[in-house]
Amino acid sequence: MAESISVPKSDVRRDIYNSIIPQIEALVSAETDLIANLSNIVAVLKEAFGFFWVGFYLKKENQLVLGPFQGPVACTRIDFDKGVCGHCYTTCKTIIVPDVELFPGHIACSSLSRSEIVVPGFNSAGEVIFLIDVDSDHVADFSDDDAEGLEQIAQIVQKLMSRN
């Protein structure tokens, strides 16, 4: 079965998120395999926005472990107290970093990454169980519109993970 999405021809990210979020919900609603769903969500985000790197990190034991992603080769494992992802994990908050060069302890998986946003996802007990990580090759590329849109997508993933 062929899947497709429709991305509006707009430079306004809020409009793009508003268009793709219901499409993502429809895309993953009937599929039960978590990895397939995460892979398709990453593909939609990459296609819709052309992000440099977009993917998931999943909490496994005492680390964040790379999940489905699109972009250059990435860090496979991240300690909870390291880098932007670790900061997001420990604070349980969305983190927007306008210039990764200025973020203390930034982990440079790619020297081409210039800005980053990381959004946490939670289980029913309120514990962080995954992160959505997005990198741009432009400084200051992320805004509150990205935070709001990606947080809505994180809520979709939380529902997927609760049914597995």
Image (spheres, rainbow, N blue to C red):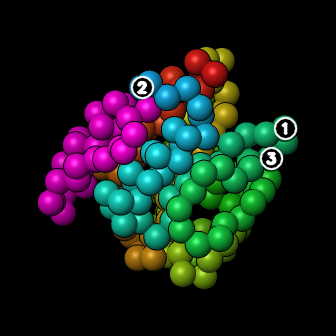
CB contact under 8 Å: marks 1 and 3: yes
Circle on res. 63: 3
Q: CA distance from mark 1 to mark 3?
A: 6 Å
The magenta stretch is: 1-28
Badge 3 crowding class, 10 Å Cα cut-off, few under 14, some 14 to 19, many 20 or more, is some
Circle 3: element type: strand
Circle 2: element type: helix
Q: Nearer the viewer, residue 91 or 29?
A: 29
Residue 50 occupies which quadrant of the picture? bottom left
On the image, numbered disc 2 is attached to which residue?
29
Of all residues, the one furthest to the bottom in this rendering is 111
Amino acid of disc 2: Ser
Q: Residue at x 53, y 75 (%)?
A: 113
Amino acid of disc 1: Glu
What is the x, y in percent for residue 109? 67, 72
Amino acid of disc 3: Gln
